[in-house]
Image (cartoon, helix red, strand yellow):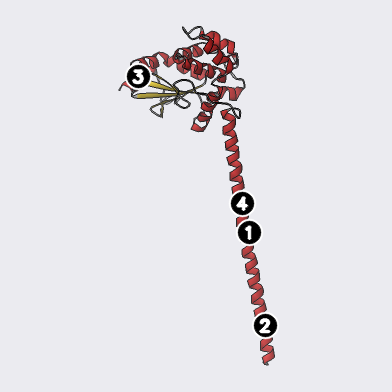
Amino acid sequence: MSEKNREGKRSARERLREQREKERLRARRRRTMGVAGAVVAVLGVAAGVGMVASKSGEDSSGKSGSRAVAPRGAAGTVITSGKAGAKKTLTVYEDFRCPGCKQFEDVFRTTVHRLQDKGRMKVRYHLVTIIDGNMGGTGSLHAANAAACAQDAGKFRAYHDVLYKNQPPETKDAYANKSKLIKLAGKVPGLDTRTFRRCVEDGRHDGWVRKSNAAFTRSGYNSTPTILLDGKAVYGDPDKPLSPRKLKRMVTK
């Protein structure tokens, strides 16, 4: 074979090798760009989820710019009733329009009060507006605000009980009527004052109630009433029903 022919074959092999190398580099660039594009897409989706979650949190907290004015003595979004030194804590997530909440209150009210008054148990109330969200209306919000106004006056427990004893049917948003809430305050000695009326009419604690409901939404619980004893769910399990006697035993043992 002549030197010229050998040189020609070598050049052809080199050109083929160079062409393959170029194709390999182009393929690698395409893969790199694909990965980068996927990362950007994932980040974009994550940003979208973040905005949705943030927007959802904002909506459930109330209108933008609304002030969350906590009632007197509240710790964050919690109103505590009972002696601070009580060793047991009952946590209650409730809605004043919720029939199930009324059922719990009607059955357990006397036992809960006795345990509170004896210093055995304190109750941490989280006021939520789940019925307003599910059925429409503002009764849950307005009633919770009125209860917070009663907390300002040091009469939360008594007014709380009045609201449940006089709870309207779930389908009738009667607690949206602030005049009704003020009228019910007449059942609590010393509560129906000008200050209380103004607090109810102005919706002084509406923003705080919305904040409390947003905290409930984030808590992982999704129904009312949710009842916890020292952080453990104790109500609503048909296989382990709770009774007033059982609650008393669990607190005093």
Could you tell me if the residues under marks 2 and 4 are in contact, i.e. CB atoms within 8 Å?
no
Q: Which three-letter amino acid code belongs to the residue tagged 2?
A: Ser
Element marked by disc 3: helix
Could you tell me if the residues under marks 3 and 1 are in contact, i.e. CB atoms within 8 Å?
no
Mark 2, other Cα within 10 Å: few <14 / some 14–19 / many ≥20? few
Q: Which three-letter amino acid code belongs to the residue tagged 3?
A: Lys
Please give the residue where the numbered disc 1 appears in the rendered image: 33
Q: Nearer the viewer, residue 125 or 67?
A: 67
Mark positioned earlier in the residue sequence (4 or 3): 4
Please give the residue where the numbered disc 3 appears in the rendered image: 248
Q: Quadrant of residue 232?
A: top left
Q: Measure how far apart labels 3 and 1 are at the Cα level.
A: 66 Å
Give the label on residue 11, or none.
2
Q: Measure how far apart labels 4 and 1 are at the Cα level.
A: 10 Å
Percent coordinates x, y for residue 134 in the rendering: 59, 25
Please give the residue where the numbered disc 4 appears in the rendered image: 40
Q: Measure how far apart labels 2 and 4 are at the Cα level.
A: 43 Å
Disc 2 versus disc 3: nearer the observer: 2
Q: Which three-letter amino acid code belongs to the residue tagged 1?
A: Met
Q: Quadrant of residue 177?
A: top right
Mark positioned earlier in the residue sequence (2 or 1): 2
